[in-house]
Amino acid sequence: MSQQRPAKGGSGIDVRAAAARSLVPVLTDKGSLAGLDEHSVVARDRSLLKELCYGTCRRLPRLQALANQLLKQPFKKRDADVHALLLVGIYQLLYMRIPAHAAVGETAGAARLLGKEWATRVLNGCLRRLQREAEALQAVVDRDESVALEHPPWLLDALRAAWPEQWRAIAQANNEPGPMTLRVNQRHNDREAYLQQLTEQGLEGHLCLHAPDGITLATPCDVAVLPGFEQGHVSVQDEAAQLSAALLGPALAPRPGAHVLDACCAPGGKTAHLLEQFDIALTALDSDNLRLARVDDTLNRLGLSAELKHADATTHDWWGGTPFDAILLDAPCSGTGVIRRHPDIKALRRKEDIRQLAKLQRQLLDNLWTLLRPGGTLLYATCSVLPEENAAQIDAFVARTPDALVTTPHDVAWGEPSGHGRQLFPAQSSHDGFFYARLEKRTA
């Protein structure tokens, strides 16, 4: 729509209006930040647009509580965009180094671009009150622990119940942006040499502690400035996600040409890592054709090849009949281990979703196990920290599957034992939250 394009030259009002429009689908449970159109504003405003949207979602429970304190009565449903503007304004005043006059004036003024000039006075009054009473208002809302820790109550309760010693640290890590971590393609370079290249480019970083191909940058950057990115020398991938290749190594390294399935493969980071590391014939499967196209793009950039299939991994329809030597099941999950990278999860995920996801994970495990040869390995992975999707899921699978032998390693320095698997928690300036369990199919 033409009114969603930036005005000539761009302005603070334009970017705030764009942020409000982008947040409406999240606030009304009709979309996610995956659909954020950074090109709806001029180039110089794109980083600000992203910060306004992601930051508002990251702090959403607290911003919502403050908005309730500031408003005499809630906005009507049709004015979700104005409500989004108020949240954006609160976020700027409390969490950004934007001058208060700009945060207030340009946020209130953005209502005119939404066709709701009446809202400028309301927004201006609310934000100016927050300026005057910030300390008192925050003290009131922070009496609620879920508000103070910026998590929906159901999720905070679930974390507390599952991890009585770690839940607070998990919540705090979720509230900080995750670092930018790279995976060096060892077909081109080793990571020590690549780290030197980064240093020469003025980019600071350090070697990952657990992932042998990983480097974490001190400050995120555009991939365009990474040496050799377009030539496939490096990719962006969290340290925890990189561990899948190491866990499958004992099954794949001794078997050149191994027949491997990466189920639920999009967006393709683990697919590519396996192909970089091992001489295998890999089938990459996903039920989302658009996301499968991203896998294809990733492999093309890296000069790698796999058989891509658009299919449902809970069925056999797509299978050619040859059992797989190894299967990576990176199962659909709640994403509760990667909230810091996808903060809209706080608004979009519901308690009842966990049961449905666990049901799907069970179906995937039971179906894919039948496609694995005797002696083969299945690696189960999620980016969740909830036991229903992780330890409890694998415990139940092992209990009902007589030929499943647990081979999850115990002599690793990452994560901690959790049932038949290992659980990593999101760690500030380090890896995301992840769960892994490795299983071998017994031979007769």
Image (cartoon, rainbow, N blue to C red):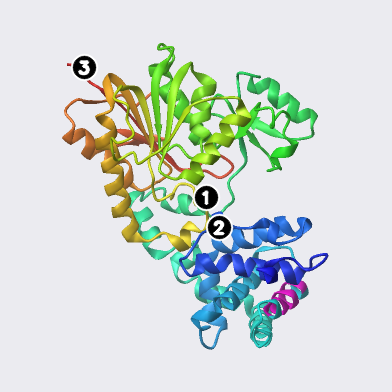
Find residue 415 and report its horizontal and vertical position in percent.
42, 35
Q: Which residue is denoted by mark 2 in the rendering?
A: 33
- Return the disc, 3 or 1, that comes first in the chain's sequence: 1
Q: Main secondary structure of the magenta part?
A: helix
**Closer to us: 235 or 163:** 235
Q: Amino acid at mark 1?
A: Ala
Dividing the picture into quarters, in which one does residue 70 lie? bottom right
SS type, badge 1: helix
- Give yes or no for contact between labels 2 and 3 (Cβ–Cβ under 8 Å): no
- The three-letter code of the residue at mark 3 reads Thr
Residue under circle 3? 443
Look at the image and say whether residue 110 sits in the magenta stretch.
yes
Q: Work out whether mark 2 precedes mark 3 in sequence or the reverse, and give the earlier one.
A: 2
Relative placement, left or right, of 409 versus 96 is left
Q: For the residues marked 2 and 3, what is the alpha-carbon distance in whole angstroms?
A: 46 Å
Q: What crowding class fits label 3: few (fewer than 14 Cα within 10 Å), some (14-19), or many (20 or more)?
A: few
Q: Which residue is mark 1?
A: 173
Crowdedness near tag 1: few (<14), some (14–19) or many (≥20) residues, C-alpha within 10 Å: many
The part of the chain drawn in magenta is 102-111
